[in-house]
Image (cartoon, helix red, strand yellow):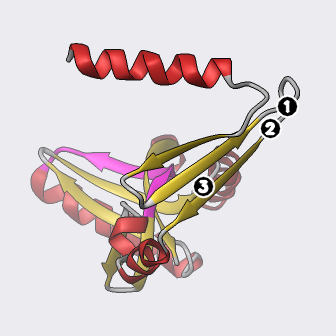
Amino acid sequence: MKKILLLFFSLVSCLSVAKAQDVVVADSAVTIVSISSHLRNTGRVAIYQDPRLETLISYHPKAYYSNYRKGNGGDFITSSGFRIRAFSGNNQVESKKRAYKIEKDLKDCYPDLETYVIFKSPNWRLLLGNFTTNEEAVSVLRELKKKFPEYGREMFVIKDMIEIPR
């Protein structure tokens, strides 16, 4: 541990001494980083890497997209976003029926809106959409509340993991 700290501090001190010079750092001969800074707050970073590394990244999409998945509808990336919670209930039989009924009513008017009926013990939930911004979700929520006032009291925007098609 002491050797690693000593090596780290010596590297930092060498970098600070060589402000006006080019410094080259090599990491096991695979990636070479060239740093040059002649003026304060300006500089240039050049990265030279083995071309085989780019091939590996493009060959394995999971290595490039840590949240890449294949689903029934095709390939998509999961990301943090927003959804509309249209229903949540904990009565096992009635909540399931109500969630699917609300889903059917909403799908009749908005066939392009993604719906997700989820059972997360002990609740049945109906989630709508894959919105990247809160503003998108709120605008659709307002539209839904106007169209379906009987469900409006239960609907609100939540932060959730969304599916973005590739």
**Is residue 76 placed above or below 48 in the rendered structure?**
below
155 vs 82, nearest the viewer: 82
Percent coordinates x, y for residue 38 in the rendering: 85, 31
Residue at the image point whose x is 32% and y is 80% from the top: 71
Percent coordinates x, y for residue 81 in the rendering: 52, 50
Mark 3, residues whose alpha carbon is within 10 Å: few (<14), some, or many (≥20)?
Answer: some
Residue at the image point whose x is 48% and y is 57% from the top: 31
32 vs 135, nearest the viewer: 32
Q: Secondary structure at mark 2?
A: loop
Percent coordinates x, y for residue 83 in the rendering: 49, 53
- The residue singled out by tag 1 in the image is 38
Snapshot quadrant of residue 2: top left
- The residue singled out by tag 3 in the image is 132
Query: Which segment is the magenta one?
Result: 78-91
Type of amino acid at the residue the image marks with label 2? Gly
Residue 98, magenta (yes or no): no
Residue 73 seen from this side: yes
Q: Secondary structure at mark 3?
A: loop
Q: Which mark is residue 43?
A: 2
Residue 155 seen from this side: no
